[in-house]
Amino acid sequence: AEYGITIPAVIEDRYLFGTQFHPEKSGDNGEVILKNFVELIE
């Protein structure tokens, strides 16, 4: 969607991570995102 401004899809600030989408519903790409996140926090 377009809103006329830049809207970040992912944020990170020290121990806080957030997304504006559902990676679990994003097929293969979402699976990669979740696997990368798990590796990051381990």
Image: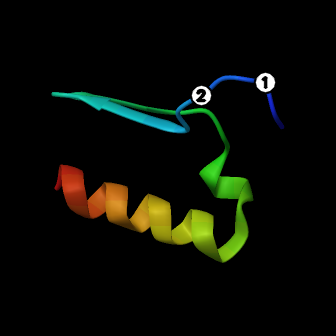
**Horizontal side of residue 22 vs 14, given as left or right:** right
Residue 3 coordinates in the image, percent (x, y):
78, 24
Asked which secondary structure carries label 1, the reply is loop
Q: How is the image coloured?
A: rainbow
Q: Give the amino acid type for the residue marked by disc 2 in the picture.
A: Ile
Question: Which labelled disc corresponds to residue 3?
Answer: 1
**Horizontal side of residue 20 vs 10, given as left or right:** right
On screen, residue 23 above or below 4? below
Q: Which residue is disc 2 drawn over?
A: 7
Q: Residue at x 16, y 28 (%)?
A: 14
On screen, residue 37 above or below 18? below
In the depicted view, which residue is nearer to us: 4 or 28? 4
Residue 25 coordinates in the image, percent (x, y):
74, 56
Q: Give the amino acid type for the residue marked by disc 1 in the picture.
A: Tyr
The CA span between labels 1 and 2 is: 8 Å
Residue 31 coordinates in the image, percent (x, y):
55, 68
Q: Residue at x 55, y 38 (%)?
A: 9
Tell whether label 2 touches label 1 (CB within 8 Å). yes
Picture quadrant where residue 6 is located: top right
| Quadrant assignment for the N terminus | top right
Asked which secondary structure carries label 2, the reply is loop
**Crowdedness of circle 2 by 10 Å Cα count: few (<14), some, many (20+)?**
few
On screen, residue 1 above or below 29? above
